[in-house]
Image (tube, rainbow, N blue to C red):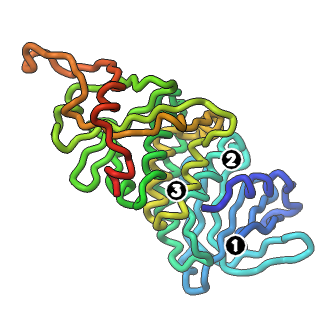
Amino acid sequence: MRDPDELRVAFARLGRAAEPGTFVGHACADEIICARDEIGNYDLFVPVIDSAVYEPLSTRIGSVYLYSPRIYAVDVGSERRVGPYLRVSLGGERSDLLEAFLATFCACLPESLPLTDARALVRHLTEVLWLLQGDQAPTPSEIKGLWAELWLIHSASNPGALVAGWHSRARDKIDFSVGGMALEVKCHEGRERLHRLRLDQLELSPDTTYLVSVCVASSPTGYTILDLVGRIGYRLSDSDRALVARQVVSVVGADVGVASEFKFEVWPDLPPVAVPARVVPRPRVEDPQVVKDVEFVVDISNAARADGIALAALLD
């Protein structure tokens, strides 16, 4: 996956273009150009093959515009670069969205450039960028939960299988469906395997449902959510990488910067384990027809020691 920090640094070096209709830019990896126009918009120019140029049209998603590929001229230093580009533009008045915008762009961008299918990138970006427009900040619990889910994907020998089975809707009872198994991922900051569960999650299918317990510690040398996205991204197809971006943005919204302040690492002597749902302690409900939506906090440390399964053994 491309590094959004490279693009952010490039934009920091640029002033506005001097004349209307012109762009002043900086060339980055893979011939992507970061540029600004005369009103200060943040423009990304992605090279495309000539046959990818099609009828001009623009799509607006909040403060972001997507312009279908055409011939552009961009001034890069003393050189004027002319060629077919897809232009993705963030309004200059929304500099607060720049970090999230660049992270989303890099996560959706195909590994191979120039683009041969510009429409696919436009489609992926359109699906994800809508999610940047919300203003609800994620809670620390949501950030830790997302971190643990990404860690599980990162730990798998076939991350694409987990991405394909990643559940995104809040009403879904579990986080992943993969290989005939249902996986519910729980994260606790500390050394206890202390997790909040819903009773219906454990009773979904007791023989094939597993609680994946991840214990983490805050650490200045740990990984952020974006770090994990980057480590996962190069192992995924373009469409799976875009799906991961959509999942991440659906949780953190425009607060990628805030989410990046959280750095975690797994305790070396307390690795993540999967515990069969059938052995997880739970409260007894006298009348399940009357008592519903039961939530409880449980320490599964003993169950993990007795019946825990290493992730490598479960997923491979």
Q: Amino acid at mark 2?
A: Leu
What SS does tag 3 mark?
Answer: helix
Q: Earlier in the sequence, mark 2 or mark 3?
A: 2
2 or 1: mark nearer the eye = 1
2 or 3: mark nearer the eye = 3
Mark 2 touches mark 3? (CB < 8 Å): no
Q: Amino acid at mark 1?
A: Asp
Along the line of sight, the residue nearer the viewer: 178 or 2: 178
Left or right position of 174 against 90 = left
| Residue on which the image places disc 1 | 30
Q: Amino acid at mark 3?
A: Ile
Mark 2 touches mark 1? (CB < 8 Å): no
Expressed as whole percent of the image width and height from the top left, the position of residue 50 reads 61, 85
Left or right position of 33 against 124 = right
| Residue on which the image places disc 2 | 98
Expressed as whole percent of the image width and height from the top left, the position of residue 175 reads 33, 42
What SS does tag 1 mark?
Answer: helix
| Residue 172 occupies quadrant | top left
Mark 3 touches mark 1? (CB < 8 Å): no
| Residue on which the image places disc 3 | 232
